[in-house]
Amino acid sequence: MVVKPSDFEILSPTKVRHTATGAVFTTYTYAEPHDAGSSMTVSAGRAGEGNLPMLDELKPVAWQLFQEQAKKADK
């Protein structure tokens, strides 16, 4: 399954949710935008159940979203 950024809802600059699984990813606000997402807390939701994507498939996209949000905030 291909996971896309559009599969996520941005709840805040430091919190995103994968809509299909309900998995929530949270990170800290860092002084340097490139550090965003380097430490994540995960609530798995239904990730890995049935045909839903696994957390390992979701994490890289959540990280990408955190990077994008941090760059927007840094401008």
Image: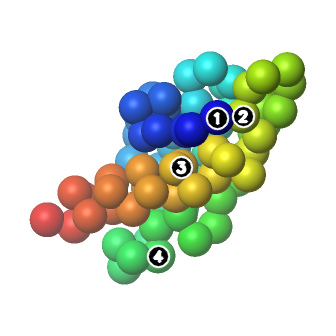
Q: For mark 2, does the 10 Å Cα neighbourhood hold few (<14), some (14 to 19), or many (20 or more) residues? A: some
Residue 22 is left or right of residue 10, and the answer is: right
Judged from the image, the secondary structure of the residue bearing numbered disc 4 is helix
Q: Distance between the residues labelled 1 and 3?
A: 15 Å
Colouring scheme applied when the structure was drawn: rainbow
Q: Are the residues at dot 2 and dot 1 in contact (C-beta closer than 8 Å)?
A: yes
Residue placed at 22% from the left, 67% from the top?
74
Where is residue 60? Give x, y as percent. 58, 56
Residue picked out by circle 3: 62
Which residue corresponds to mark 4?
35
Say whether marks 4 and 2 touch (CB < 8 Å). Answer: no
Q: How many marks?
A: 4
Circles 2 and 3 in contact, beta carbons < 8 Å: no
Say what amino acid the circle numbered 2 marks: Pro
Q: Image quarter for residue 31?
A: bottom left
Q: What residue type is labelled 1?
A: Met
